[in-house]
Image: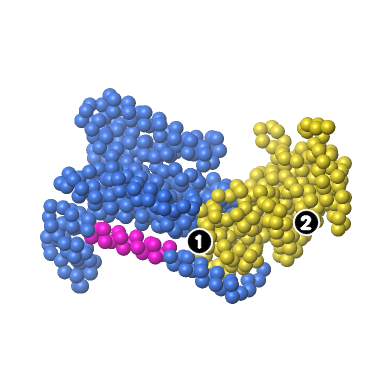
Chain colours: A yellow, B blue
Amino acid sequence: MVNITIKGLSFGYNGSKILDGLDLVVGDSEVLGLVGPNGSGKTTLIKCIDKILKPKGSILLDGREIEAMNRQEIARCIGYVPQSSSTPLATTVFDTVLMGRRPHMSWRVSPADIDKVAEMIELLHLDDLAMKDFSDLSGGQKQKVLIARALCQEPEVLLLDEPTSNLDMKHQLEVMEIISSLVKQKKVSAVMAIHDLNLASRFVDKLAILKGGKIYAAGEPRDLISTENIREVYGVEAMVMNDLDRPFVIPLRSLNGGIACD
Amino acid sequence: MNSEKTVRGIELRDEYQKFIGRKVLFFLALILGIITLSGIAATLGSAEISVLDVYSAILARFFPDYFQTTWFAETIVWGLRLHRILMAIVAGAGLSVAGAAMQGILKNPLASEFTLGVSSAAAFGAALAIVMGAGFAGGEFLIIGNAFIFTLLASFTVYGLARYKGITPETMILAGIAIMYLFSAMTSFLQYVGQSEQVQEVVFWMMGSLGRSSWDRVGIITAVLIICYPYLILKSWDINALGAGDETAKSLGVNVERTRVIAMMLSSLITASIICFTGTIGFIGLVGPHIVRMAIGGDHRFLLPGSALAGALLLLGADTLARTVLSPVILPVGIMTSFLGVPFFIYLFMKRRKEFW
């Protein structure tokens, strides 16, 4: 179990700031959803936590400064799941998941590594696809393979970059259910960039709303998903209703870009 | 996280072992092909000896108590033909491995010694020696030394340009193509100002040939391969991870820039050490790895050794044909590699419907 503490995090390219002085805490076995409009810095924040990008400020993993850890150490603690659509791979499902053992093994693949891969493939119900080529899979299947690969790293923190983008309704729910149950089962913390507020409302423990590279608000979904916040952050008029103690959003119209029809 | 062994889990492990077994079988088939073709290639020439004489002459050198040979067969095989055959094997293996590594680290199916400017730099080095008589070494090493030095110079220039813009596959390929055009233009200039015999020699050098082989040269290329190949194989997991994108590779613990630069330099060194002796031999570095990728997939733990074997078989096959189709005229092997390999490659490419890259 591990918690993440982010203090004064800033990142920018060529003078323009993408993240601007972020403070955030992710608790043990907690799923934090990062929401916000395009360009608000969700993906950049995830890449900074994994030290793919090098920001200013401090990111602590259970008190250990990420900046002081080398790539191998970070890979043993943090699993990163990129968007499946951006991952072309010429390997089989089994070999793709096996790649997740890279931070733990030398060149030789041990029987224990093979066992771990088989375990993750079974856990994500990918056994019938194990020897198929990754490129032959559907978007939902690819996403599950990438989650299995990240879990093979035996991480304490799981970072997911829009895991449900490009997926149909069934696969969106399936992927979110898998992530939600794995976080509890494997006792890892997860940070997930997500666009769909309704999925976020249902599956994350905590939300952080980003706007212009800053944390606009952070807290429980039921406290943050409101017509006022959606109007302010997204510039969208929406109706927020409550079902099973979770808010859900019906977007009505864009406030500044739409064309009036009546 | 417990790894309980379920029935399905055990089945999965067995399936994976069989999957690996199929790749090993593919390797064994290639090795068998190389041994057979080597035997046949050594029988070709004005002095007639049989395949059995060839194998006996080779084995008698290592196991004199068990195999008998004649002075004639031993002289023909060891003195005249075997070094050319081994040159084809080590040069083909090296070019193909370098191509596979370049394609892997640059995530580009077109990456090869040509697209990275390495071949045209070598050609310019050779042309400079032939036309102007200028070079880094003298005597018989004038052309070889120039080709070698300019090859490495091109690699460092590509690296320098890419480093300035940020080392990504795109910057390296674009820098490579720019360097390729620069050296091609300079070679064309030398051909324009050169005398007709010199131009003919430059053209012949650029077609590639194994006719300049010798035991020393086989030894040098083998030594370079022995030094460079283990690093590439050791980094095969990292090259696999690079295929998933730089960000994923970093998240899996790979030092992306260092791996890319070292692998690129070693690939260039392998290529330089081969083409300085043989001239530019196209096709092998590009298509050898693709044939293996189509046959056994893109896992570099198997792709690199598989490419070495396929490259060796392709170049040996091409050289054997080059020596026989218009015998006694020996065609430049660079021509034959394309004549032999392209139809085979197109056949595989058309037959395999799903994506392989």
Q: Which residue in the structure is indicated by mark 2?
A: A203
Measuring 36% from the left and 57% from the top, which residue is drawn there? Answer: B309
| Labels 2 and 1 within one chain | yes
Q: Is residue A103 above or below residue B16?
A: above
Farthest residue in the top direction? B193
Q: Foreground residue, B145 or A253? A: A253
Q: Write down the region rendered in magenta.
A: B23-39
Q: Nearer the viewer, mark 2 or mark 1?
A: 2
Main secondary structure along the magenta-highlighted residues: helix
CA gap, disc 2 to disc 1? 38 Å
Residue A2 position by quadrant: bottom right
Q: Which residue is mark 1?
A: A107
- Name which residue type carries label 1: Trp
Classify residue A89 as left or right of residue B152: right
Which three-letter amino acid code belongs to the residue tagged 2? Phe
Tell whether A241 sits left or right of A65. right
Image height of A20 relative to A167, above or below: above
Residue B23 percent across, percent down from the top left: 43, 63
Q: Does the segment drawn in magenta span residue B191?
A: no
Q: Residue at x 63, y 71 (%)?
A: B3
Q: Position of residue B215 (x, y in %)?
A: 24, 52
> Chain for mark 2?
A
Please indicate, yes or no, whether residue A201 appears anywhere in the rendered image: yes
